[in-house]
Amino acid sequence: MKKLNKLSAGIITATLLSISFIQPIHTTFAASIKNEQAEKGSNQNGSKQTTLHDKSSWDKSSLSFTAENVICNGISATIKNGQDSQAMQGEAAYEVYWSANGNPKDGEVVYTGVVNALPSGETQELTYTPDQLMDGNYMFKAYQRPGHPGKGELWSGSITINDNAGLTEDIESQRPFDQFFKTSVSRGTATFTVPVGMDPIEISFTSYVYPEGTVPQGDGKPYEGQISFDNVTNLYGPGTYTVEVDLPNGYFQTDLYLGSEIEKLTECGHPMDKIIDADYGPKAD
């Protein structure tokens, strides 16, 4: 790919999924933490004296999930120890659940990790980065510290991963896309050909402006923070097309890709199942 190999993009569309691979070190360590928490909290339904003892052992921390994201090589969820809570006096366990369809809570555990002992008001990004993130629905589950007066567990929002959403098998098999569509992208001009016999397909051509003060690297990075400056999105049937967009002053990036306009790029750039071709550089005087 003429320009595509410079864009090591990797966002996977939407919200989450993966293979049943559990890293052994995290699994063993997190499992021991989980077992310890379960043993300390197992008597909460027992005598009044035991319940009082359990509550008195609580370190007054309280965890909550604040965000879920798809990252370049996996998924993540942000967990926070409450602003009005006390510092955690030890670590806690978390798990990642996956289901091919339906509610991930009814699925299987594909990963186990550790929540660090967070001070009051501090956050941690929990991650799941397998060798291959499979399509499906994901949720993070974490455990409160022993003695917590609530349920003792909490769930993140659901993340759905659909790597090839909107792509037919015919299109998906035609990589690299720049060769399939016979593209040429130079500055603010893109030329491409939709093959004969192909159904109309939505393609976008967008110029992006870098954040102020950012100087692009040799591969066009950093992608994060780039914002759409001008865009053309249309359905294109068989034929050859030339599309033009305006360029910002200074550094720019122009991307030709499948689907509707992506207004703001993340650190991963465009999803690899979408990007066709690209260019970047300074605008000539």
Image (cartoon, rainbow, N blue to C red):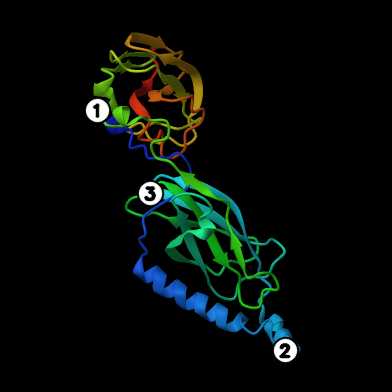
User: How dense is the environment of label 2, judged by Cα within 10 Å: few (below 14), some, or many (20 and up)?
Assistant: few
Q: Residue at x 37, y 49 (%)?
A: 133
Whether 212 is drawn above or below 81: the answer is above
Q: Is residue 111 left or right of residue 104?
A: left
> Is residue 147 visible in the rendered structure shown here?
yes
At which x and y percent is residue 50? 70, 88
Query: How far is the residue under mark 1 from the one under mark 3?
Result: 25 Å
Q: Inspect the image, locate mark 1, and give the three-letter code of the amino acid beneath it.
A: Met
Quadrant into which the C terminus falls:
top left
Quadrant into which the N terminus falls:
top left
Q: Secondary structure at mark 2?
A: loop
Q: Read off the residue under disc 1.
A: 1
At which x and y percent is residue 244? 41, 11
At which x and y percent is residue 114? 48, 67
Q: Secondary structure at mark 3?
A: loop
Q: Residue at x 50, y 76 (%)?
A: 33
Q: Inspect the image, locate mark 3, and give the three-letter code of the amino acid beneath it.
A: Met
Q: Earlier in the sequence, mark 1 or mark 3?
A: 1
Q: Read off the residue under disc 2.
A: 47
Q: Read off the residue under disc 3.
A: 134
At which x and y percent is residue 174? 26, 28
Query: How far is the residue under mark 2 from the one under mark 1?
Result: 69 Å
> Is residue 122 visible in the rendered structure shown here?
no
Q: Earlier in the sequence, mark 2 or mark 1?
A: 1
Q: Secondary structure at mark 1?
A: loop
